[in-house]
Image (spheres, rainbow, N blue to C red):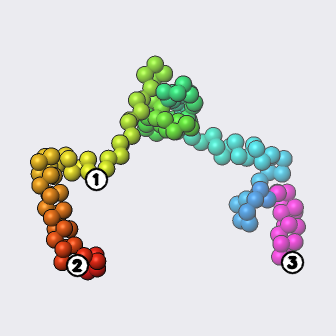
Amino acid sequence: MRGRRLTFAMEAIGGVRAGGSSPAGFVDPGAQRSDIADAQRQGVERQGVVYWCAAGHSYCVTFAADASVPATWECRCGLPAGQDPDHPPVVAEPAVYRTPLEYLHERRSDADLDTILDEALQAVAAARRRDPTGRQ
């Protein structure tokens, strides 16, 4: 019942509700929704910045006029894009997967690794001599 009274009240004052439930939502009945939205959006000045990626894509990103513009932006293809069409940002090489053995070779010499391997093999052989079935 209350909603119906509110509708009659709106018609009585000549307004139409634009949305929501607050009385602040009343607008001129002759105004279109797009006019209202345009009036609300006109407050901010904008600038368009064009970015190019190494794959040849270009696109415009809109920023506020007083906003700081980033030097690079991620393209829709996933590559980094820059503002210079002749020199787009270079794609960083992905990290190469290395095995644990490669990390060991970085830290130790081949002679040290041979010594460690011999010690480990001797320990396994000694354990097998104590219990030939392999149970511990």
Mark 2 surroundings within 10 Å by alpha-carbon count, few (fewer than 14), some (14 through 19), many (20 or more): few
Displayed quadrant of residue 35: top right
User: What's drawn in magenta, residue-wise?
Assistant: 1-16
Residue ID at (32%, 47%) = 98
Q: Is residue 108 above or below residue 89?
A: below
- Tell whether position 14 is magenta: yes
Q: CA distance from mark 3 to mark 2?
A: 91 Å
* Nearer to us in this view, 46 or 82: 82
What residue does disc 2 label?
131
Residue 38 in sight here: yes
Secondary structure found at label 3:
loop
The mark found on residue 66 in the picture is none
Tell me residue 13's x, y (percent): 83, 60
Mark 3 surroundings within 10 Å by alpha-carbon count, few (fewer than 14), some (14 through 19), many (20 or more): few
What residue does disc 3 label?
1
Kind of residue indicated by mark 1: Pro
In screen coordinates, is 119 left or right of 38? left
Tell me residue 65's x, y (percent): 50, 35
Residue ID at (28%, 76%) = 134
Residue ID at (56%, 38%) = 76
* Nearer to us in this view, 74 or 40: 74
Tell me residue 74's x, y (percent): 49, 38
Kind of residue indicated by mark 3: Met
Kind of residue indicated by mark 2: Asp
Tell me residue 64's x, y (percent): 52, 39
Q: CA distance from mark 3 to mark 1?
A: 75 Å
Residue 45 in sight here: no
